[in-house]
Each structure stands twice: as structure tokens, then as C-alpha cells.
Amino acid sequence: MIDSHCHLNDERFDSDRDEVINRAREKGVSLIINIGSGYGFEGNLKSIQIARENAGYIYATVGIHPHDAKLFNNDIERKLRKLIEENRDIIVGIGEIGLDYHYNFSDPVVQQEVFRKMLYLARDYDLPVVIHSREAGDDTFRILGEGKNNLRGVMHCFSGDRDEALRYIEELGFYISISGVVTFKNALKTVEVVKAVPLEWLFAETDSPYLTPAPYRGKRNEPSFVEYVYRKIAEIKEENIENVERIIDSNINRLFSTLTSPE
């Protein structure tokens, strides 16, 4: 199992981060992708540090989250490029980036400008993108489509419907990532997405410390809980869990092509 998206750089892991990582190993999580964006620019630095301290087991992404778009400037872009150039062995993607019109912590126009700059960054370094889209489906799809011949990526914690999911796959060639939300009793839309999307286009993630799956709802999420996402996907698909693990892990390795599993 691979946790394709988590936030171990979150302060909620500061007191027991090593124990959390060890639990993931013990539960059979073979690789972790830790997302740098979402905590200002400093979140990228911390993500790289965590990956460097766990080389071969944890990889990092870097970028500017839509919430932080208002903080972006030329100096931040220079720093991001320098980070990528100096850490190509552990940085496997640009993300999470995109649009969030639910909170609008940054002006939507500014979000769109920074989103495009992050996509240019991904193209310049030939890295896949990890996309955050909340209540911004039309604009997200439109902006991604502007460069569809040069981009590859995944829709993180996908919250759209089955038709939207299939459109991302068929028109953009993007993967669809499923979080612990799929285990919630009211997650009918996400269940329909899993039913409709072929296994060859699905990812599994925790988005920890957020979106804790059943049976641990109400507690802090962590990478070891990705098992429950894999199991729920297998249940919905009526597939053998080992086959689901094999296919999803292959998908993640295919997109993040620089990953190498530990011995």
C-alpha cells in the first residue's frame, strides 16, 4: 500500500512524527508521498526535511496551495525553483495546487494566476501535478485543459461526481484519488465515483491529519489508516484486496515515476 497524499509536516505530528511513520511501516505502507504546500512556503521546506530524513520511504511535493496564493511573488517562485533543482531525488511532484472557492482565503483571480504559474513550474521540470479543487470545478478543468498536452497529474481527494471524474480521465488523462471520505456513511457520490472509474485510474490517500476514515472518525488521521481506503475500494469494486493494492500502487508509481520502493 502507498499513501499517495499526506501532510506529515502538520504541527499535529510534531510530538510523535517518528512513531506515526513507524506505524505506517508496520501496517504495510510501502511508500508515503508527503505534500509540501498548504503551510505557506515553509511547509515545502519541512516536507523536504521529512523526506530527506526518511529517504527511500517518504517523498515530497512542493508548491503553493490556493489558500496561500496571496503570498506568492517572484521571490517565492525563485525559492521553489531552487528547492526543486537541489532536491530532484526526493521531490516527485508539484502540489497540492489548484483552486478553492469554498474558503476564498485568496482572491479567485489571484488563485487562478498562481495556479497557472505552478503548472508552468511543473512543465519546466517535467513533474506531475497534485490538484486541489473545491467548488471550482469548471475553472479547474478549464485551466488544466489549457496545457493538457504537457501535463500529467492526479485529482487529490476527488469530491466531484462520476461524470466529472470520467471527464478528467478521458479528456486530460488525470488519475482520481480517493480519500477516507469513501468510508463515510453519507459518501454516496464518492462511492459512485469508485464504481464508475476503472481501477487503473484510481489512487488511494489519507490526506492525514484530515478526513480520518471509519472506524477512526473523530481522531487524527495518519498514513497507516490508508489500509481502510484500499479495503473500501476493494469492497465497492468487489475485488480481491491484494489485486486492488497491486493495481493502485502501480498507478501511483506510474505517475510519480521517480519513486523507488525500499528493499
Image (spheres, rainbow, N blue to C red):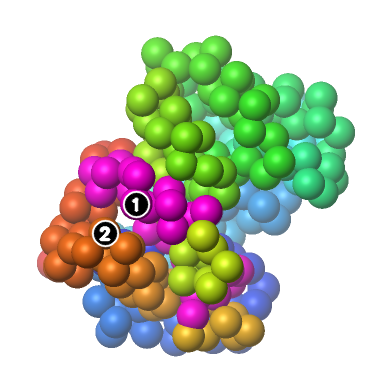
Identify which amino acid the numbered label 1 is placed on. Answer: Lys
Residue at 57 percent across and 49 percent down: it is: 159
- Assess disc 1: are there few (<14), some (14-19) or many (≥20) residues with their C-alpha within 10 Å of its C-alpha: some
Residue at 15 percent across and 67 percent down: it is: 240
Q: Position of 36 compared to 102: left or right? A: left
Q: Position of 232 compared to 160: left or right? A: left
Q: Badge 1 is on which residue?
A: 195
Asked if labels 1 and 2 touch by Cβ distance under 8 angstroms, the answer is yes
Image: magenta residue range:
189-214
Quarter of the rendering containing residue 63:
top right
Can residue 5 be seen here? The reply is: no
Position of residue 71 relative to residue 21, above or below, is above
Residue at 45 percent across and 17 percent down: it is: 148
Residue 225 x, y percent position in the rendering: 42, 77
Query: Residue 237: which disc?
Result: 2
Asked if residue 208 lies in the magenta stretch, the reply is: yes
Q: Position of 174 compared to 101: left or right? A: left
Identify which amino acid the numbered label 2 is placed on. Answer: Lys
Quarter of the rendering containing residue 169:
top left
Position of residue 188 relative to residue 223, above or below, is above
Q: Position of 245 compared to 207: left or right? A: left
